[in-house]
Amino acid sequence: MKNTKEKVLKIALELFSQRGYSNVSMDDIKDTASVAKGTLYYHFESKDGLFNETCQYFFEQIKSYVVKKVGKEIVDTKEDYYNIVLASIDYLWDNYENVRMFFLSSREHFEKNFGAHDLFGNVLNIQIDVLKKLGFKGSEAKHIAPMIVSLWMTIFPGRSQNFFTNKKFYKEKALSVVKTLIGGIDEV
């Protein structure tokens, strides 16, 4: 059953990314995944429930990519953090169209259902926790995290408008900004 659930999550991620939350039905997902309606509803009680689990699946995909690329899951040092930032940029850059569409879809879903965009709040909280682990006070981490997340988000308009065409250059400049934010200007 786990394989079926993962298959449905993968298909849901693709469809939500391509069409947006409002333009995907449970029947679309069922048909594309080639599963029975009962099987779909056995795993997910509603479209909202499926979308929420798809968000978790999406973040697990990014996390898995980053851990594989960096070689570790735990951030112990600033150098670990820099490597994670670079791996995250690689993932976002290489998958930017699907990631951009998924973020737009998730924004639509959360604003419609909760009146706020919780997905970005979750990303910020993860960054705040990592920065605290690196020794930043709560208030410092809360000020730095949105700047780092914003830096990642510039990939989407920058790539779609052809402002950013050189990943290596973008990564160097992004890392320089991150090092300035968390490491001090003397390390840049």
Image (cartoon, rainbow, N blue to C red):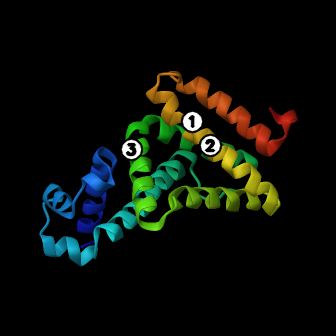
Q: Nearer the viewer, residue 142 or 70?
A: 142
**Amino acid beneath label 3:** Met
Residue 78 visible in the displayed image? yes
From the viewer's perspective, is residue 133 above or below residue 39?
above
Residue 82: image location, x then y, percent: 68, 43
What is the crowding at mark 2: few (fewer than 14 residues within 10 Å), some, or many (at least 20)? few
Q: Which mark is residue 101?
A: 3
Question: What residue did someone put label 1 on?
Answer: 154
Give SS at disc 3: helix
The answer to the question of whether label 2 and label 1 lie on touching residues, with beta carbons closer than 8 A, is yes
Q: Nearer the viewer, residue 61 or 74?
A: 61
Question: What residue did someone put label 2 on?
Answer: 150
From the viewer's perspective, is residue 145 above or below residue 122?
above
| Separation of marks 2 and 1 at Cα, in angstroms | 6 Å
Residue 146: image location, x then y, percent: 67, 49
At x 28%, y 76%, the residue is 45
Quarter of the image where one finds residue 27: bottom left
The answer to the question of whether label 3 and label 1 lie on touching residues, with beta carbons closer than 8 A, is no
At x 62%, y 60%, the residue is 126
Q: Quadrant of the C terminus?
A: top right
| Separation of marks 3 and 1 at Cα, in angstroms | 14 Å
Residue 15: image location, x then y, percent: 27, 51
* Residue projecting furthest to the right: 186
Q: Earlier in the sequence, mark 3 or mark 1?
A: 3
Q: Which mark is residue 128?
A: none
Give SS at disc 2: helix
Give SS at disc 1: loop
**Amino acid beneath label 1:** Thr
From the viewer's perspective, is residue 153 above or below residue 44?
above
**Amino acid beneath label 2:** Ser
